[in-house]
Image (cartoon, rainbow, N blue to C red):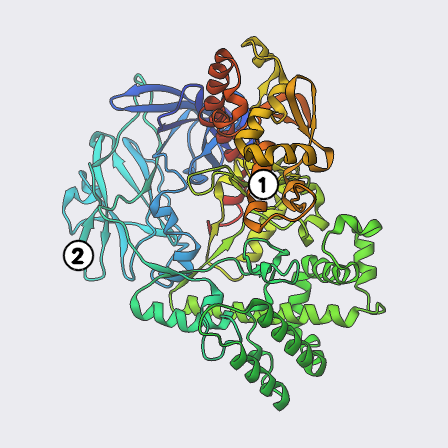
Amino acid sequence: MALPNDRKLLVHFRTSYFTQWGEHVAVCGEGPLFGNWDVKKAHWLSCRHLGDELLWEGLVPIPVVGEFTYRLAVVNESFEVLKWASERHTVVLPEGLEDGAIVDVDEAWTDEGHPSLVLARSAFARVVWRNRNAASGVRVQHQQPAPNEVVVRFQVHDGELKAGETVCILGGTAQLGNWQLQEVLAMSPVSPSCWEAEVRLPLSSLPCTYKYGIRRADGSLHLEAGENRMVALPANDGARAPALVARFDGCFRRAQRWRGAGVAAPVFSLRSAHSVGSGEFLDLIPLVDLCAATGFSLIQVLPVSDTSVRGTWRDSYPYSSLCVFALHPLYLRLQALCDNMPDDIAADIEAARKALDLPEGVDYEGTMEAKMRIARALFDRRGEADLDSREFQQFKAESWDWLQPYSVFCMLRKVFGSGEHWNWGSLSSPTQEVLDRLSSPSHEWHTSMRFLWWLQYHLHRQLLQASRYAASRHVALKGDLPIGVDKCSVDTWLCPKLFRMNVSTGAPPDYFDPNGQNWGFPTYNWEEMAKDGYLWWRRRLAHMAQYFHAYRIDHILGFFRIWEIPGDCSSGILGRFRPSIPLSRQELESKGIWDFDRLCQPWITDEVLLEVFGAELAPEVAARYLQEQAGGRYRFRQQYASEAALASVPVHCGLGAELPPEEAEAVRRGLLALRQNVVLLRDPEDPNAFYPRFALHTTPSFKALEPHWRDELRHLHDDYFHHRQDSLWRLQSHRTLPALLGATDML
């Protein structure tokens, strides 16, 4: 007989999942028995076809323990996780299991995006159907195996239960009610959306069919849709029956999912009788009342982070953040800054409200000037009382990691006259010592910094008030998380290694813009971000969770590939995807393509100039902007060699007289077309790597090539944009998105 501490179990895992070639399903888990969540040490399952299913199963020997925790994953042959199942499962084992006992774990693979799981996340559980099912955390009474019986544990999820509804099981044995509607087996809520039940079934009753049902508040029973489920003994060639069958059945199968409606509205558009120039955070409250009265469940807003980068109307663009943690002063309710407003300041607020109450649109610069001026006047009189309050001290302590660098940055920007922090000399690379010194009480601008703290404190209070009110009315607030930050931002100053500052992000050409889009944001250094588990993103998500119940991530595609544009470009057409697999010199040469300077430099000839500018302007353009080369070709003079240079220089021709505006703009467009007349883009970090210029077949440079080169390059272009990157981008998405999804239940 085996000693007690030598007893072993055999855990039989089973799930159905259709993998692609080269993919495998593995069992990963807690502790050394399951690899400590390291997929390289996980247990790989074997697959076989069973009817219309691809069944993955395997036996894992473990010592007898009280419980174990595992999660299924889809991995490739390089041990990279391509997809996790929706959740971790903890299997509590019966006491006193014999040596060699079998535990059968049968899991219905469920993706994290299953509607029932989505409807159990924050926006719904905390807000939309808040208090619907308050009971949870019930401890299920675990059964002990008995001769000729097997303990079966059932678990199912449902995120749509209404008040008074419970989940139950009905099936083809006496223990499951023999399909009699009044004899169901009740289940217990172990979490707000997860229900469990445990029962001993005679071995002779297996296989047994069953379904889950919902017992409504009026006593009626609603069975799930679809075919009957089945609990059966695994085929084990005459071996002993399992002591425990754990059925993780995924989600309740509803014939019709919950449907809801909401409204999308920028906060600045919600101007009310109290607003000064723009809609404000507290204007969300009457919108919440409207939504609650009309049955709307969600309000989605545009980004509300501070975008006051340059102090002009262009800062009204909500996707160019100065600091991803700071809120925008545009949305401040001045009247709510104190209870007993001084009469002169109250009169100033009312005058500004009337002056800025435009019949349409927002006077962004006028509104910002009025709000900052009035808020500062009030701070100088009443601010100290707020700063001494316990509530402010708590806000400051919880926000100091971003509030301190934000306020220091704003002061330095004022000193240097620009947010281009790379030109700030020794202050271009801030240290904690520098931040502490510049934010110390002895510094001349300390009062102005305290004003910024006070301002952010009140913005925080006002948005939090609106958010809590929305939750009380069962209306979720959905925030918008911009994909980018401005190059002149606190984040790029404080964490420069996380950003690729010498390039910009944008979008490739499309039907709406044949030159693509250049948003001007730096791209992310995902490799650097991964080193600390994407801490910057996780902090950002946690910060937003104070105010919002769900998020929209702007340009979600950017998490696995982004259109990256050289820093000296003004349009998006000379960009390429990052990450992406380039065309190598060896690959191109193997196809007979070798003249890389010809393909990467603008193709400018007399014929091209004549076609673009016409006979009258072509000689003048060539003389002023180009240098003639051998073989009848031209190249740009150095000062005009980039899109950015061509977009900014005044356009002259002839004797230096200015052209009429429309003709000057036509010349500028022609010069940009010349600069964009390339076939390949050389990688600045690897001279032997190349990328096809978007729509290269439309360029005069391409049309001047010999037929063989045109055919090969057209094929490589189409492959690069439509096939070549698929596996890489899928892998990248599985690296970045799970880290973010794991940090919050609000996506």
Give above or below for 1 relative to 106.
above
Q: Is residue 659 left or right of residue 182?
A: right
Q: Nearer the viewer, residue 373 or 458?
A: 373
Relative to residue 446, is residue 675 depicted above or below?
Answer: above
Q: Residues within 10 Å of mark 1 (few under 14, many from 20)?
A: many
- Above or below: residue 375 compared with residue 112: below
Please tell me which residue lies in front, 386 or 582: 582
- What residue would you read off at disc 2? 220
Q: Residues within 10 Å of mark 2 (few under 14, many from 20)?
A: few
Q: Which amino acid is tagged 2?
A: Ser
Percent x, y for residue 675? 61, 33
| Residue 739 visible here | yes
Q: Could you say which quadrant of the image residue 13 lies in?
A: top left
Res 198 quadrant in image = top left
The answer to which of marks 1 and 2 sits earlier in the sequence is: 2
Tell me what residue is drawn at x 69 percent, y 27 percent: 685
Residue 626 location in percent, x, y? 68, 31
Q: Position of residue 357 (x, y in %)?
A: 49, 77
**Circles 1 and 2: CB distance less than 8 Å?**
no
Q: Residue at x 67, y 72 (%)?
A: 454
Q: Residue 142 vs residue 612: left or right? A: left
State the residue at coordinates (27%, 30%). Answer: 148
Three-letter code, disc 1: Val
SS at circle 2? loop
Secondary structure found at label 1? helix
- Residue at the image position 65 percent from the left and 68 percent from the top: 394
Can you tell which of label 1 and label 2 is closer to the viewer? 1
Q: Is residue 325 above or below residue 118?
A: below
- What label sits on residue 261 in the rendered view? none
Q: Label 1, on which residue?
A: 667
Single out the residue that lies furthest toward the bottom: 343
x then y, percent, for residue 321: 60, 55
